[in-house]
């Protein structure tokens, strides 16, 4: 079943891109949407059959591939990867549906989207280090082309910058993976067979630093974040949806699966530094978002800040903080795409994203009242207002991380206040007040423009009111990951306890 999640999009890409007959753009779009819908249905079936209390890799598929390299085809799904699989297919459906039906070169465009979906799916399913790396690198190619061909005026610069940063990320990850396998004496890259505990602590830390920086570029964390705002601004709206909602999660997923889970002892040593790094990313991202005048760039910098919360929870590495980390990954994967969709509709109808130009879009007669209302919901969710999934995910991260890193957690909480600041600036300038003369006579917004945003908004509210529908799939897996392999929380808490006894 899991192989079908990878093969179906690949076959769909071949069908759309290489069938030797001329296919109109709308038919290409419908074919791509049908294939992605089938994949989404398969992920739902997988979730229905998934056993939340079973912490092993379920529906596992394994066979040797290239024995001389130690490469195996081993895929499986657990509570960490399952929510991301569903998120990937859902947002791919949203991206395809949101694409302009009159897009140029539709066969190539939809083929690349399907290949991107397959590569990300493979990365989340891979249980072999080298197999993960192959999928991790494959997704780079379609995303680069999607930005470089269908992006804005500076698309070449943004795509090249993305390519260079991601290539460096891949080099660091591959070097660290090779070091883990060769230095541990393993003959295979299979994740389950690796034993890193025999490595000297200095070696473990060096390897982990390579993994953390490699995935930190992908997340991205400060100071490796500069490719992200450029990529978002130049990418089309559907590509921004995938970039924010799915592609960045490859970095956070990699930190948990191949950082914390693979080198737990070294993770405990660098955890305080990771928590400090998280604070820097949160505050810097929020501070850069405040002065922006481009709506899309503001949302892009907000992603930099919110990804820092994920690193904070991962650094604390308690069962509750890792659960909150996964929830934050899903939360950001719903909220950020919603904001990019809405900004895309504003740009499509008003022809501008400048906060100094657009005014009064909540005008009920001549503005965009429904889009403005959805934007209110989106910014409230991003700012952590109760009743939204953003609140519960951030609350869990802060609640769990405070026990381990109280200072870093308190500083990170400032980021939620700054989020409210820059989004209030956006709402006040763009949606409130008198409708500006530059954006009068706006074209009609059809339900086809609103539908993807309404779906994401509904999920944000549903999971905010009933978070257990999300946590039940993940809790057993994340708890087992921490209790069986990670000692960060106990080490740091014991250190605080010892200091407290000495003071008394």
Image (cartoon, rainbow, N blue to C red):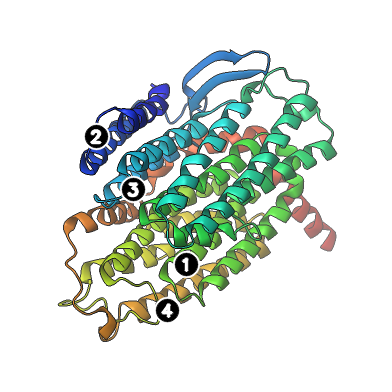
Q: Which residue is mark 4?
A: 425
* Distance CA(mark 1)–CA(mark 3): 19 Å
* Distance CA(mark 2)–CA(mark 4): 48 Å
Circle 2 packing at 10 Å, graded few (<14), some (14-19), many (20+), is few
Q: Secondary structure at mark 4?
A: helix
**Of tags 3 and 4, which is closer to the observer?**
3
* Distance CA(mark 3)–CA(mark 4): 28 Å
Residue drawn at the location 77% of the way across and 29% of the way down: 197
Mark 2 or mark 3: whose residue is earlier in sequence: 2
Q: Which residue is mark 2?
A: 22
Residue 414 is drawn in which quadrant?
Answer: bottom right
Mark 1 or mark 4: whose residue is earlier in sequence: 1
Circle 4 packing at 10 Å, graded few (<14), some (14-19), many (20+), is some
Q: Which residue is mark 3?
A: 95
Q: Position of residue 117 (x, y in %)?
A: 41, 37
In the picture, which quadrant includes the C terminus? bottom right
In the picture, which quadrant includes the N terminus? top left
Mark 3 or mark 4: whose residue is earlier in sequence: 3
Residue drawn at the location 68% of the way across and 35% of the way down: 174
Looking at this view, is 19 or 278 the one in front?
19
Q: Which residue is mark 1?
A: 297
Q: Secondary structure at mark 3?
A: helix
Labelled pair 1, 3 in contact (Cβ < 8 Å): no
Q: Secondary structure at mark 1?
A: helix
């Amino acid at each position: 079943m899991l192989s079908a999640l990878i093969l179906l999009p690949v076959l769909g890409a071949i069908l759309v891109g290489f069938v030797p007959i001329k296919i109109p753009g709308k038919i290409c779009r419908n074919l791509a949407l049908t294939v992605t819908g089938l994949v989404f249905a398969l992920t739902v079936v997988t979730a229905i059959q998934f056993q939340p209390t079973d912490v092993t890799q379920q529906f596992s598929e394994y066979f040797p591939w290239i024995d001389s390299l130690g490469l195996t085809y081993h895929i499986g799904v657990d509570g960490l990867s399952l929510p991301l699989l569903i998120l990937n297919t859902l947002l791919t459906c949203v991206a395809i549906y949101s694409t302009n039906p009159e897009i140029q070169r539709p066969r190539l465009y939809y083929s690349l989207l399907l290949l991107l979906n397959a590569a990300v799916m493979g990365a989340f399913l891979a249980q072999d280090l080298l197999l993960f790396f192959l999928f991790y690198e494959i997704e780079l190619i379609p995303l680069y082309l999607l930005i470089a061909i269908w992006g804005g005026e500076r698309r070449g610069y943004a795509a090249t910058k993305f390519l260079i940063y991601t290539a460096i990320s891949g080099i660091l990850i591959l070097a660290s993976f090779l070091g883990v396998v060769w230095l541990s004496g393993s003959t295979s890259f299979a994740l389950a067979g690796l034993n890193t505990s025999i490595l000297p602590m200095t070696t473990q830390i060096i390897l982990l630093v390579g993994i953390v920086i490699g995935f930190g570029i992908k997340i991205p964390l400060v100071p490796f974040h500069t490719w992200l705002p450029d990529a978002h601004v130049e990418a089309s709206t559907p590509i921004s949806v995938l970039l924010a909602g799915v592609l960045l999660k490859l970095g956070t997923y990699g930190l948990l699966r191949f950082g914390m889970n693979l080198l737990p002892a070294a993770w405990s040593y660098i955890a305080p530094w990771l928590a400090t790094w998280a604070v820097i990313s949160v505050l810097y991202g929020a501070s850069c978002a405040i002065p922006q005048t481009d709506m899309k760039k503001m949302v892009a910098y907000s992603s930099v800040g919110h990804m820092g919360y994920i690193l904070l929870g991962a650094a604390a590495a308690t069962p509750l903080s890792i659960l909150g980390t996964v929830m934050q990954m899903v939360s950001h994967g719903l909220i950020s795409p919603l904001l990019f969709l809405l900004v895309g509709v504003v740009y499509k109808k008003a022809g501008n994203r400048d906060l100094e130009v657009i005014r009064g879009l909540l005008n009920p007669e001549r503005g965009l009242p429904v889009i403005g209302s959805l934007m209110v919901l989106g910014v409230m969710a991003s700012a952590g207002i109760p009743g939204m999934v953003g609140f519960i995910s951030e609350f869990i991260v802060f609640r769990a991380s405070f026990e381990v890193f109280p200072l870093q957690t308190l500083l990170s909480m400032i980021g939620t206040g700054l989020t409210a600041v820059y989004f209030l600036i956006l709402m006040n300038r763009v949606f409130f007040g008198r409708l500006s003369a530059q954006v009068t006579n706006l074209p009609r917004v059809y339900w086809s423009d609103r539908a993807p945003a309404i779906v994401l908004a509904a999920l944000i509210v549903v999971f905010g009111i009933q978070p257990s529908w999300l946590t039940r799939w993940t809790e057993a897996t994340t708890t087992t990951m921490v209790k069986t392999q990670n000692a960060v929380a106990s080490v740091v808490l014991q250190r605080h306890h010892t200091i407290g006894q000495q003071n008394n």
